[in-house]
Structures are given as C-alpha cells and as structure tokens.
Image: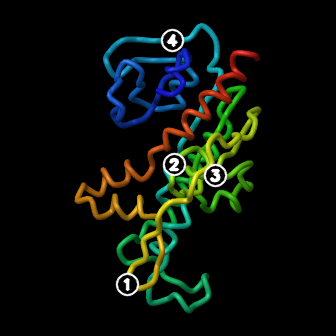
Amino acid sequence: MAFRKLGHNAFSCDLQECSGGHPEYHFKGDMFDVIANRGGILENGTKYFLDGNWDLVIAHPPCTFLAVSGARWYYHPDDKNLPIEQRRPHPKFPDRAKDREEAVQFFMDVSRVGVDKLAIENPVGIMSSRWRKPDQIVEPWQFGHEASKKTCLWLKNLPFLVPTNVVGKGEVYVSKSGNKSPKWFTDIFFSGVSPEERRKLRSKTFPGIADAMADQWGSKIITA
C-alpha cells in the first residue's frame, strides 16, 4: 500500500490470496501472465488492464530453497564432515536439490521479465553465486525499525535505496546452544502461530523499507 498512499496505481500479485486486506488491488494468479497481459482479473472479481506496459515490478521470489538459512536441510546431518559430492540428501527433504533448481529457474525467469524497471528482493542466499551478487543489501534499522534482516536487492534501471532513518540494530536472542538470531525473528517462532503464518510474517517487507521504495523509486516513474 506504500505506493498507493503516494498516488501510484499499484497492485500486488501472488498465487495465494492477498494478505493485506485489499483484494481490489490484488491479482491472484501467475505473475508472468499478469505482466504479459498487462493485467487480468483481480481477487474481488473485477477486470483491470493497462493501456501500456508496467512501469515497475518489485518481485519477491520464494526464498525457502534459496536462502542460506535453509542450507542445513540440504544434506544428511550425519554427512556434515564428508566432501559435498559424497553427502546424501537430507532424510526429511529428499527432493531438496530438485526444489532448489526449480527455485533458481523461477528467480532467473523473474530477472528476465519485460519491464523497464525491476527490483528483485531476497534474503542472503545462493543467487549471489548462481547468478550475480546483489546490487545492494539493506537492513530494517536503516529505515526506522530496530531490527536486523539482511535484504538483497537486484536492480534494473533503479537507484540504490537511500537510508531514511538509521536507528539501533535491535535486540538479539541467544539460545542455550549459543546461537544468535534477531529477537523479532524468534518472537515470531515462539508466537504459537502455524508454520505457514510464521513464514508469511518472517517474509513481510518492513514498512520503512516499503515507504522508501515508494518514495524514492516512485519518483523515478513520475519523472521518467
């Protein structure tokens, strides 16, 4: 909604239902179809099509199989001291390699969509080596939120985001084993919500970052 608040004709698109309570601005379907067709049927049942092409696409490819945080589920835990080529798949996730390759392919398909301005957002993961390093890495604490969450941005015809309000990096949770993680992240884990709801909450874009995108990138659309 950050772009809408500034007067932009912005929409979301996902195979799932909208999570922000605005089905009138949400295409529930394949993003590639919506981009190619310059619109489609919104979740509330109305049709919307552009006269021209989309000015800007901000994409959030699924990161489950791309993020470094999921690497521990790739190989069998008993094989951690073996060379990579000798490790077996994780017994709970035997199709992880296939899932990863499909995720990489989807990410690369997103990188080739036919729009003038494109931003792809993902956490730190394998795309830095499988494709290229991100153009920029931003953190919530650079945009008014006392929280840490490295967010990689791959940009096409867009400037780097300029921090708007640098604050503290937020509290850190230390587990009994000594592992550290941002407190906001562990608070979600221990909140009692379903795994699917946890995934959604963890992947949400912090409002300060969304506002910066709308303000700084939206102005590039107006002046283009």
Q: Is the C-beta separation of discs 3 and 1 under 8 Å?
A: no
Residue type at mark 1?
Answer: Lys
Residue closest to the eye, 93 or 28? 28
Badge 4 or badge 2: first in the primary sequence: 4
- Numbered badge on residue 193: none
**Of circles 4 and 2, which is in front?**
2
Which quarter of the picture shows residue 93? bottom left
**Of circles 3 and 2, which is in front?**
2
Position above or below: 41 against 194: above
Badge 2 or badge 1: first in the primary sequence: 2
Residue type at mark 4?
Answer: Phe
Residue type at mark 3?
Answer: Cys
Residue tagged 3:
152
**Of circles 4 and 3, which is in front?**
3
Residue tagged 1:
176
Residue drawn at the location 42% of the way across and 25% of the way down: 27
Q: Is the C-beta separation of discs 2 and 1 under 8 Å?
A: no
Badge 3 or badge 1: first in the primary sequence: 3
Distance CA(mark 4)–CA(mark 1): 54 Å
Residue tagged 2:
145
Which quarter of the picture shows residue 157? top right
| Circle 2: element type | loop
Residue type at mark 2?
Answer: His
| Circle 3: element type | strand
